[in-house]
Image: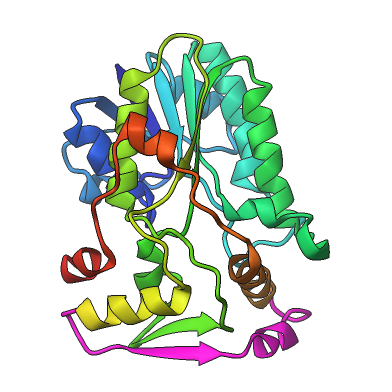
Amino acid sequence: MTIAVLGSTGMLGQPVTNELIQAGYSVRLIVRDVSRARQLFPQADIVSGDLRDLASLTRALQGIDFVYLNLSIRQTEKQTDFHTEQAGLANLIQAAQIAGVRRIGYLSSLVMRYQGMNGFSWWVFAVKQEAVRLIKASGISYSIFYPSCFMESLNGTQRLGPFVLLVGRSPVKPWYVAAHDYGKQVAQAFRIATEGQNQEYSIQGPEAVTQHEAASRFIAAYRKERISLVTAPSFLMGLGRPFSPQADYGWHITEALNKYPEIFEAEETWTELGKPEITLERFAAAL
């Protein structure tokens, strides 16, 4: 089986790509920046392709069985911009249909389900929901993964130099999962998928903890340098919303993460794909 990956060089794409390679799949990376991808994956099959360019995608997908999409909306994007999970995904689906791709794997989100709760409405979640609809309407078999919070965010999007920044406080307990564990589950999902079968999996880690508990445990186990936890009131980020797309993104995603009533729903996932094993302490100590 040959799997193409789009989004292989990102924070979550790298560990998932490594797990697919280690699982023994023949993996092709479709990227815009070939030289950067070559540095990260020197032995991989790497080809140039752009989600804005249907012809380049069609060429890159020749001979591919499955394609895995690790796409995202950048914090600086505006609603009127080109979105990889909207226009880019539409191009990808068309190219996959032309090339004869048999399955689309897609990284979605659990927290996007907050859309419509408590009057919450955000164009980013609307794009993500439309992405799921497009994939399901494509006529191509699909594997869609809906993850909880990734541990990587504690050392990525929530990390500001020597600080881990959280906005507001919440009693909600997400099931933090490490991207390497998730990558193993993706590899297993592809391994057990049968022709014409559609898969949807909730992805949750080994335990549920509040964001502050997760950050505190991560900081205590982190060994590279001393870092601290900073909690900012949500109204401060709200003040910047009219002036900064990044502040607007931060306010919305924080509002959703702080209020989405996540419950455990990964029992079937664990049964079929394996239970995640990486704890917050193991994740932090391995960095």
Q: Is residue 189 visible?
A: yes
At which x and y percent is residue 101?
A: 47, 16
Look at the image and give the residue range highlighted in magenta: 222-244
Q: Residue at x 39, y 54 (%)?
A: 10
Q: Is residue 87 visible?
A: no
Q: Is residue 115 above or below residue 64?
A: below
Q: Residue at x 43, y 44 (%)?
A: 7
Q: Is residue 82 left or right of residue 92?
A: right
At which x and y percent is residue 63?
A: 37, 13
Q: Is residue 14 magenta?
A: no
Q: Is residue 249 above or below residue 220?
A: above
Q: Quadrant of residue 32?
A: top left
Q: Quadrant of residue 139?
A: top right
Figure quadrant of the N terminus: top left
- Residue placed most toward the observer, 42 or 206: 206
Q: Residue at x 73, y 55 (%)?
A: 115
- Residue placed most toward the observer, 250 or 49: 250
Figure quadrant of the C terminus: bottom left
Q: Quadrant of residue 203?
A: top left
